[in-house]
Image (cartoon, rainbow, N blue to C red):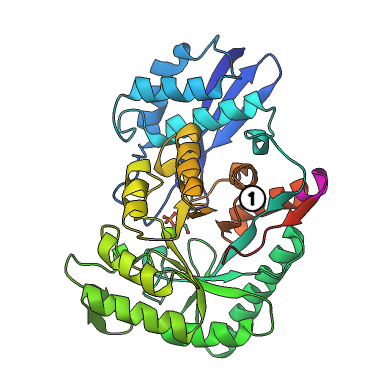
Amino acid sequence: MIRNLKIFSIFNSKGTPAIMVKIQTDNGSYSASIPSGTSKGKHEAKELPVERVLKNFSKIRPRFVGKDERDWRGIDSLLKELDGTENFSKLGENLSLSISIACARAAFENEIWKIHKPRMGMEFPIPIGNVIGGGKHLGGTDWQEFLVIPYGAKSPGEAVEIMVSIWASLGEELRKKKMLIGKNVENAWMTKLDDLKTLDLLSDVSEDWKVKLGIDFASSSLWDGKRYVYKKLGKSLTPSQQVDFITEVAEKYRLYYLEDPIQEDGFRQFMILNHILGKDCIIAGDDLYCTNPERLRKGIKNKATNGIIIKPNQIGTLSLADEVVRIAKERGMIIIPSHRSGETEDDWLADLSLAWDAPLIKSGITGSDMTKLNRLIELWEDIPEVKMAKLPL
Ligand code: 2PG
Ligand code: MG
């Protein structure tokens, strides 16, 4: 039974206030803290300022005391009911998700990878790591994240080792070329090179390793309502020119993973791109879907993508995120659980990626994101009969 709930104002990796909730039951004390995005999709659930969240918490806290934590889905329904809006704009998704995850942790005594019946031979996700960055995350490039996917790794530990080695050697290479600016919000390198020269460099360095390349284009931040505006490359493209440009780049650099290559409401261009590239490349919707079941259904109907980013704080509770995962998997979509750019030390994303049988997990490479990767390493040792997932395409 839930005996008590507490809330703390903490700080995330960007140094901005975040919250942590702690739930006390007869069995112990269980906490959760929630990350925050920088390049948020406009269809995401609403994150509220910490001060408001603290006030909301004191109002709703008594409704949870005495409840059975094992009914974590019931707790999520209560959160939805108390909020009463479509997008948690009254309570704040940071409040709802922190209660939701802390409660699930209490229900499974911290092992939330068990929310779906664990089975033998569990597969561990291949990490996707951000090595060079730009866009709203800051940096010299227009595109937000240049990603490496160490598909040849035989364990999560080896995957991290490969990503970190590539990240370090890219930093060194940029320094030598005098093209290094520094590190951005996700600890990815910021470079003076333009987007295409960055891809040239990445192709060279990654040739020595068994990695696939990807990009989070975060195209909504290039979109001015009519055209995609590239400051660094000095281009301004119509929607159909953007499709052509992305196709050309994906083919030339043999990209395997393309996230948000089109702005968040461009279902039609997503569909065209998915039709052209979707057999060989993962076309993942992040801002496009915002982990929202209605938007996902629209994407499925239109064959807009073959993959979906899952960020539980875009929808507000664990059960709602779980439902989106269920719908996506039922329709053969590749799911990619993902961190946010303002992270906390909490590692629940790693557990959920296992629970959901995700073939991939997206995170940063160093800093606060290390806790998620380390949790994968820990579970790899703890769970019997495990194997690494295969690339989904
Ligand atoms: C993204 C994420 C994480 P943010 O766009 O995929 O890398 O960034 O948290 O800023 O939305
Ligand atoms: Mg993204």
In front here: 314 or 178? Answer: 314
| Quarter of the image where one finds residue 299 | bottom left
Image-quadrant location for residue 347 = top right
**Which residue: 42% across, 51% down?**
37
88 relative to 376, above or below: above
For ligand 1, tell me if the residue under mark 1 lies within 8 Å.
no
Q: Quick one: which residue is furthest to the bottom in this view?
A: 177
* Residue drawn at x 40%, y 61% as measured from the top left: 305
Q: Which residue is mark 1?
A: 372
Q: Position of residue 297 (x, y in %)?
A: 35, 47
Please indicate whether residue 82 sits to the left or right of residue 162 in the image.
left
Residue at left offset 41%, top offset 82% = 249
Magenta range: 380-385
Magenta stretch holds residue 20: no
Rendered image quadrant of residue 150: bottom right
- Residue found at the very far left of the displayed protein: 226
Which SS class for mark 1? helix
Give percent across and percent down for residue 99. Answer: 50, 27
Q: Is residue 381 magenta?
A: yes
Q: Which residue is at 37% across, 70% downward?
A: 275
Residue 356 visible in rendering: yes
Judge from the rendering whether residue 21 lies leftward or rightward of residue 384; answer left or right: left
Q: How many marks?
A: 1
Tell me which image quadrant ligand 1 sits in. bottom left
